[in-house]
Each structure stands twice: as structure tokens, then as C-alpha cells.
Image (cartoon, helix red, strand yellow):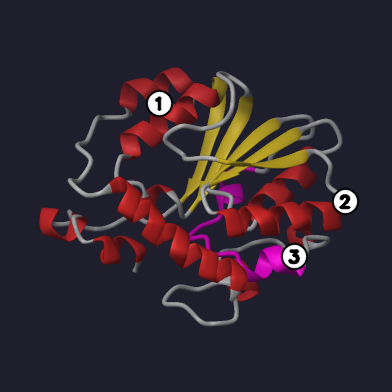
């Protein structure tokens, strides 16, 4: 999808009335635990079994450090929408421990570049260590929010995101940022959760439901 089409087709929706900083803190706490204690067990699938469930090719995972794989907590497979090509520039929004960013870095090597963005320091630390361990020098990880991506306008050939948009109350703002950093005719590849019926306004204001 072109960035122009994305801007035209993204209908504005009102963000729910809740404390954004409180929500972000709750999400950071949850995913810091996934980073630091991946074997604890969660209400959602994680790790290599999740990657297998979502159709990740074994070849994609070859050479990816287990530290990143074990803390994988996505909800879909952005690469099922198309592989990235050598030489492309890619941004991974909500990169977590870096599994998708590292896969992307392998796909776009040797001349392509990847920027992984996340707001949870424990996840970023794990992703950076894994990049060094894997010997991937064409990927970097930056702390930031999806609603204000630390990347220049029109930089990326593709933006990927996995299980992150559902955690953002202002989805329109996040999508506008993704459009901003994409080149004209750039690609948006998102794996996420869809609901079959509207969520009540009361439920939208309960932070524990956002993280749980």
C-alpha cells in the first residue's frame, strides 16, 4: 500500500479515555518479565513454539540467538505478507527482543538496513545483545514509541509490526507515523489481533485488560 493510500484510507478513531503513561508502564512491566523471565509462563504463547505456530520458516530462525527467540511474543507473521528484499530499508515497530528485526536484517543483507523500535529497555537490551551474537551489523535498536518513531521521513521500504498495534490506544497516530517513515509506495506488513465485535468503552478504560 502506498503511504498516500494509507493516509487517505485510515479513518480517524477516538482514542479511549485512559492514562497513557500508566498504560505504557503496565505494558513495559509485562514485557520486561517476558524478556527477563521467558520461562515463567504467560497467558499468551511465547518463544519457539509460538514461532512454529505462526508459520515461521526454520531457515528464518537459523542463526537467530535463542535469547531473542525465547522472548518472542508476537501475534502473527508479518513475513507471510511477503519477504523483504536485499538492499531494502526496514523499520520494525515494537521489536521486542528483536526476532523479527534480526530475521529482516538477514533478508535485506548485505546492503539493506533495519531499525528496531521498542519502549521496553529490557527487551531492547536483549535485542542488542542478540544482534552482536548473531554478527548482524546492519540492524540497530532504538528506544521510542510507535506514535513518535525515531526515524526520518520516507526512509523505509517496508514497516513491519507484530502484536503491537493492539496495545496502542491511539492507533490512528501510530499508523500515521508508519506512513510518515515509509517511502512512496512503501509496504506496511502487520501481524496483529482482530476482534469480531466492538469493545465496550468501559472495557477500553481498564488497563489490566489491555495488558491481559
Label 1 secondary element = helix
Question: Residue at horizontal 47%, vertical 26%?
Answer: 179
Looking at the image, tell me whether mark 1 or mark 2 is earlier in sequence order: 1
- 193 horizontally vs 36: left or right: left
Tell whether label 2 touches label 1 (CB within 8 Å): no
Dots 3 and 1: beta carbons under 8 Å?
Answer: no
The front one of 129 and 193 is 129
Q: Left or right: 163 with respect to 96?
A: left
The stretch in magenta equals 66-82
Q: Nearer the viewer, residue 106 or 58?
A: 106
* Screen quadrant of the C terminus: bottom left
What residue sits right under mark 2 in the picture?
A: 135
Q: Answer whether residue 79 is magenta in the image.
A: yes
Which of pointers 1 and 2 indicates the residue nearer the eye? 2
Q: Which residue is mark 3?
A: 58
At 39% from the left and 56% from the top, the residue drawn is 25
Residue placed at 79% from the left, 46% from the top?
106
Query: In the image, is 98 to the left or to the right of 32?
Result: right
Q: What is the crowding at mark 1: few (fewer than 14 residues within 10 Å), some, or many (at least 20)?
A: some
- Residue 112 in the figure: left or right of residue 153: right
Give the image quarter of residue 56. bottom right
Foreground of the two, 62 or 67:
67
Tell me if residue 70 is in the magenta stretch.
Answer: yes
Is there any visible trace of residue 44 in the rendered image? yes
* Mark-to-mark CA distance, 1 and 2: 35 Å
- Number of dots carrying numbers: 3
Position in image of residue 65 (x %, y %): 78, 64
Q: Residues within 10 Å of mark 3 (few under 14, many from 20)?
A: few
Q: Which residue is mark 1?
A: 6
* Residue under the point 71% across and 45% down: 104
Say if residue 52 shows up in the picture.
no
Callout 2 environment at 10 Å: few (<14), some (14 to 19), or many (20+)?
few
Amino acid at each position: 500500500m502506498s503511504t498516500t493510500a494509507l493516509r487517505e484510507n485510515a479513518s480517524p478513531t477516538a482514542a479511549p479515555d485512559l492514562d497513557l503513561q500508566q498504560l505504557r508502564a503496565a505494558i513495559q512491566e509485562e514485557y520486561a518479565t517476558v524478556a527477563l523471565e521467558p520461562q515463567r509462563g504467560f497467558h499468551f504463547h511465547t518463544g519457539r513454539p509460538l514461532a512454529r505456530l505462526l508459520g515461521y520458516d526454520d531457515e528464518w530462525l537459523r542463526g537467530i540467538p535463542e535469547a531473542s527467540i525465547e522472548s518472542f511474543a508476537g501475534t502473527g507473521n508479518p513475513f507471510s505478507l511477503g519477504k523483504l528484499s536485499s538492499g531494502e530499508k526496514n523499520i520494525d515497530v515494537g521489536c521486542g527482543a528483536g526476532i523479527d528485526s534480526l530475521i529482516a536484517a538477514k533478508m535485506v543483507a548485505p546492503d539493506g538496513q533495519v531499525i528496531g523500535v521498542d519502549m521496553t529497555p529490557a527487551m531492547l537490551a536483549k535485542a542488542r545483545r542478540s544482534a552482536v551474537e548473531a554478527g548482524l551489523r546492519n540492524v540497530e535498536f532504538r528506544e521510542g514509541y510507535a506514535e513518535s518513531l525515531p526515524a526520518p521521513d520516507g526512509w523505509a521500504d517496508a514497516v513491519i509490526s507484530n502484536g503491537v498495534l493492539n496495545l496502542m490506544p491511539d492507533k490512528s497516530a501510530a499508523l500515521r507515523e508508519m506512513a510518515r517513515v515509509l517511502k512512496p509506495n512503501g509496504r506496511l506488513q502487520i501481524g496483529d489481533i482482530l476482534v469480531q465485535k466492538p469493545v465496550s468503552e468501559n472495557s477500553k478504560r481498564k488497563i489490566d485488560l489491555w495488558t491481559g
